[in-house]
Amino acid sequence: QEAATPLMQELINLHDFVFWIIVFITVFVFALLGYVALKFNSKANKTPSQTTHNSLLEVAWTLIPVVILVVMAIPSFRLLYKQNDFSQIDMTIKATGYTWYWSYEYPDHDEIAFDSIMLTEEELSEGQPRLLTTDNYLVVPINTNIKMQITSDPAGVIHAWAVPAFGVKMDAVPGRLNETYFNVTEPGTYYGQCSELCGQGHGFMPITVKAVSSEEFESWVESAKVEFAKEKDQILAEIK
């Protein structure tokens, strides 16, 4: 999937950077093996060399890999730090994994809470992808640093909240609150899935995220307060 967040774009850039380093090393080693096979086979080299070591060569093949690893490590550690930098968070959402669906809470917006359950094939509308669409979307504003607090039902199993376009994949562990964050730059609908083998319903707890403008988000918040409050009251009435 194309990057929808700055962090995912940086992940792609790092991947491309490391990829070309790997390509260069692979081509170099392959060419070196070919040269050795042709230059030093028994037919081309009747009198083999008795050299046992070469100090300059030994220093070079030790230092060059170290330099390559350092060149790869610096941007990697920088990105790892950025992925865990929660110093400029604008809002928080809590995701809880159940067997087998996700439940969301908006603690910064009057404790809005709802379950997000996968739609069956009969419930899908045109354009909605199978096994990825939920009845209630996780609605978020664009250009906003959103911290996701991710956990799992205390009586449940380990899940993982993952949206590839966001560059986010975080385990949901019973009794533990893990955190990650993202900032969506473009409006749209994005999809993810539980990425932990959590049981027989593993493939049926998708994630549907709808990114909207700040104005649209505020409008959704007002309507969601009413909608999900009614659902909560109805559930409580049924329990009574």
Image: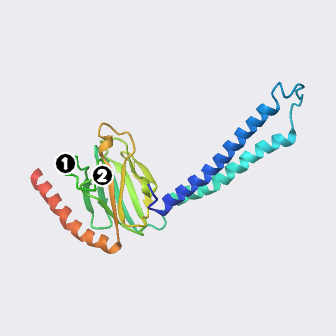
Q: Please tell me which residue is depicted at 82% across the width and 43% down the height of the picture.
A: 59
Residue 240, visible in the rendered structure: no
Q: Please tell me which residue is depicted at 39% across the width and 68% down the height of the picture.
A: 142
Q: In the rendered view, would you say 185 is above or below 195?
A: below
Residue extending farthest to the bottom is: 215
Q: In the rendered view, would you say 181 is above or below 20?
A: below
Q: Nearer the viewer, residue 58 or 21?
A: 21
Residue extending farthest to the front is: 43
Q: Please tell me which residue is depicted at 24% across the width and 71% down the height of the picture.
A: 222
Under mark 1, the amino acid is Glu
Q: Quadrant of residue 168?
A: bottom left
Residue 55, percent from left and from top? 86, 40
Residue labelled with disc 1: 122
Under mark 2, the amino acid is Pro
Residue labelled with disc 2: 129
Q: Quadrant of the N terminus?
A: bottom left
Q: Residues within 10 Å of mark 1 (few under 14, many from 20)?
A: few
Compute the Cα span from label 2 to label 1.
12 Å
Q: Residues within 10 Å of mark 2 (few under 14, many from 20)?
A: few
